[in-house]
């Protein structure tokens, strides 16, 4: 079992980074209880270094969490394009221009999805590496976090271009046969 405030990894993936030592209030429904999280006595770094390590892990985790809505939105659009492609493919020659527009959106969307996945994977890898070691993050790990943030912003911007430009263009090529969905741009991850 992981030690709060210590290193050595987490128990359940997706639960988020462990907390720093300190006093916390835990609430379940209307029940509240104060708990004191003690530092792991085997994890011998200063409180300042512990906070630096924790902040780096939280930063890498935040990249992943902030990209989840973009990943979900991209999948929703991909599913829509798949259905529309089937519909307009069945229309034969009269649906040809719509199929071409849908294929264009699908290619651009696949690129944006790949960017999103790379940023999430990169952030997860550096988070796991830092979380599995009880010392301070390395300079290379801090650079990886910076790059993950840059990649996350680029991925969200690429998806927003698809949402704002490519999807409306594809729907206009359908000649009003299908009403476009109301798609909102995704938030660009920020520190």
Image (tube, rainbow, N blue to C red):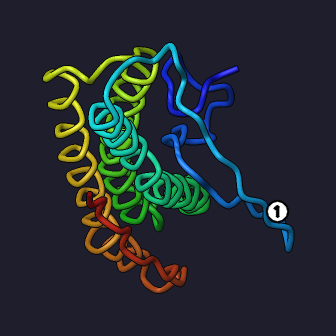
Q: In this view, does 80 lie to the left or right of 133?
A: right
Q: Is residue 26 left or right of residue 154?
A: right
Q: Residue at 32% across / 48% down in the picture?
A: 112
Q: In this view, does 124 lie to the left or right of 151?
A: right
User: Where does the image place residue 50, in percent across and percent down from the top left?
Assistant: 35, 32
Which residue is the site of mark 1?
A: 28
Q: Is residue 110 visible?
A: no
Q: Is residue 168 visible?
A: yes
User: Where does the image place residue 144, in percent across and percent down from the top left?
Assistant: 21, 29
Quarter of the picture holding the N terminus: top right
- In the image, residue 114 sits, relative to residue 35, either above or below, namely above
Front one among 16 and 82: 16
Q: Residue at 38% across / 51% down in the picture?
A: 103
User: Where does the image place residue 189, in percent across and percent down from the top left?
Assistant: 30, 59
SS assignment at label 1: strand
User: Where does the image place residue 177, in percent across and percent down from the top left?
Assistant: 53, 82
Query: Would you identify the image quadrant in which residue 142 lies?
Result: top left
- In the image, residue 39 sits, relative to residue 36, either above or below, namely above
């Amino acid at each position: 079992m992981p030690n709060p405030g210590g290193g050595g990894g987490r128990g359940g993936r997706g639960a988020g980074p462990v907390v720093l030592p300190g006093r916390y209030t835990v609430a379940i429904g209307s029940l509240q209880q104060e708990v004191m999280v003690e530092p792991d006595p085997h994890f011998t770094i200063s409180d300042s270094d512990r906070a630096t390590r924790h902040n780096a892990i939280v930063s890498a985790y935040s990249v992943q969490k902030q990209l989840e809505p973009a990943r979900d939105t991209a999948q929703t659009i991909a599913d829509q394009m798949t259905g529309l492609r089937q519909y307009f493919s069945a229309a034969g020659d009269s649906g040809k221009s719509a199929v071409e527009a849908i294929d264009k959106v699908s290619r651009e969307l696949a690129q944006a999805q790949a960017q999103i996945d790379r940023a999430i994977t990169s952030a997860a890898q550096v988070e796991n590496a830092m979380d599995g070691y009880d010392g301070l993050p390395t300079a290379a790990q801090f650079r990886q976090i910076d790059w993950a943030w840059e990649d996350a912003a680029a991925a969200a911007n690429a998806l927003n271009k698809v949402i704002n430009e490519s999807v409306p263009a594809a729907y206009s090529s359908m000649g009003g046969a299908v009403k476009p969905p109301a798609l909102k741009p995704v938030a660009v991850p920020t520190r």
